Amino acid sequence: MKTTNLLVSILALCMISISYGQRRKKNDAETQPAAIAQTPKLVVGIVVDQMRYDYLTRFWDQYGEGGFKRMVNEGFNCKNNHFNYAPTSTGPGHTSVYTGTTPSMHGIIGNDWFDKASGEEVYCAGDDNYTSVGTTSKAGQMSPHRMLTTTITDQLRLHTQKRGKVIGVALKDRGAILPAGHAANAAYWFEGGEDGNWITSSYYMADLPQWVKDFNASDKVEVYKKPWNTLKPIDTYVESGLDSNTYEGLQKGETANTFPHDLPAIWEQNGHFDLIRRSPYGNSITADFALAALEAEDLGTDTITDFLAISFSSTDYVGHFFGVNSKEVEDTYLRLDQDLARIFSTLDEKVGEGEYTVFLTADHAAINVPSYLMDSKIPAGYLDMKGMQGKFAEFLQYKYGTTDVVRDLSNYQLFLDHDILANLDIDLDDAQKDIARELLTYDGIAQVYTAQQMWENEYLEGIPYILQNGYNQKRSGDILLVPSTGYISYSRTGSTHGSAQIYDTHVPLLLYGKGIKQGSTVNRTEIPDIAPTIAALLGIAFPNGATGQPIGEVLEFD
């Protein structure tokens, strides 16, 4: 009997101990602090110039496992990602990705635009207050001074007391400068011509670092002076049109616009190293230089987050010249896929797998060549700008007695001379409306909006919503033109962009690495959402003009 009682007592004590242990374990788990931010050693922002979303799906079966597919399969894919403003061009695109807002706030309303104060055309990154570094030309007289708000890269610099490094790299100056922000350690871009060197501006430094000088002195660029043939057998490139067609440009010195392209044979006629821009080798050079920066600047080697902003520009040059349905575009993306895989593999080795975060998007998409669409019986066409200008001049002369009431036409925006209208005792609002009505009658123009409409209304959807987000009250014009769907002002070969139409706004957004969930969404996301998403991930302040929202379903906190 005593033995039985003893056993019961021991069992009871064991149950109490187990129960207490379980409660303590549960309470300990409940009191664990929630992760307030992720701390990747490095954030890599990648912008692929002129990348349509459907380049992911069209060329999917041709891609390897380590580039685009790695980002999609192991990261997060926003399938319905759009620019929410126009014009859709490189300067505004890169700026909007990194500022988390639109031209209405950040002020970069085009690559170039008519400056109402000076009466001259200005360049988005041009700045005569600074000198070139690494070249004797004016190609380095640049800065981000026309960008009116901070970038996610600026906020990282401020948050880390400038201990986190920020470096921008691109063939195009604007593709390096605008993402790197105002407070960057450096931005580097490629000067073609006879030298083919990487350069910068005195805005960042007085002299190139030794590693950049060494890179320029090496043969790392010269090795790409070679023929361009397809990476894979051309008969496997079934995702694009015929190699020989009338929809592509013809390079100087070539007798056909088909593969192979003998770059050394046409080198001098096409600007020496400038020719490399219009080939996938320009992207490879960019990857080479970005990886050199990673190594030389010790990016991602400590616990303070660094930021490497990379823009691949050759995709835009190739798309403009050969068109979005060309074999050349397909080959360029297959080779870019290899360059991405090379970057990710190096990041795994140098920074550590799971220790970095990457996002990839585009600065705009592009239209298929309208002449090809027309031959395919799809509504499209080309604006007769010369004919329109003649007809419009006649209208102005009849209506106002002078054509001087118009100062400039650029980026599908008309700038009126307010002083002349006032001297003629013509109300500005009336002039805007009258001119808008006239322009709406022209072939190839689908919609016209006035600045007054942009001021008075709040548009929440459709084309006017996109135009309003691109409208900056101090910098934009008086009348905004919307070409008909499928219509462009461009040559009859090659593709372009810039409109508010969906073929120019739909671009990829892939996120991968530390703090990023695996998955996808077809919910609409917009370009200004990227910077707030990265800011929320890092637990830092949003860029000071941000209007986008974090994409919550993307983020994962331990």
Image: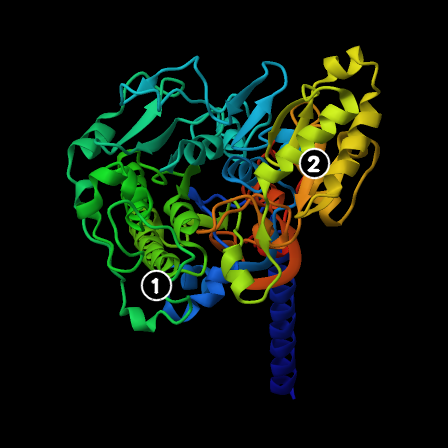
The one of 41 and 84 positioned closer to us in this rendering: 84
Q: Which one is in front in this view, the residue at disc 2 or the one at disc 1?
A: 1
The CA distance from mark 2 to mark 1 is 38 Å
Earlier-in-chain disc, 2 versus 1: 1
Q: Which residue is mark 1?
A: 244
Residue at the image position 60 percent from the left and 61 percent from the top: 25
Quadrant showing the N terminus: bottom right
Q: Where is residue 274? Give x, y as percent.
A: 29, 38
Residue farthest along the bottom direction in this orientation: 1
- Work out whether residue 545 can be spotted: no
Q: Where is residue 264? Give x, y as percent.
A: 18, 46
The one of 152 and 334 positioned closer to us in this rendering: 334
**Colour basis:** rainbow
Residue farthest along the top direction in this orientation: 423
Q: Where is residue 528? Give x, y as percent.
A: 62, 42
Q: Please indicate whether residue 399 sits to the left or right of residue 340 in the image.
A: right
- Work out whether residue 185 can be spotted: yes
Amino acid type of the residue tagged 1 in the rendering: Ser
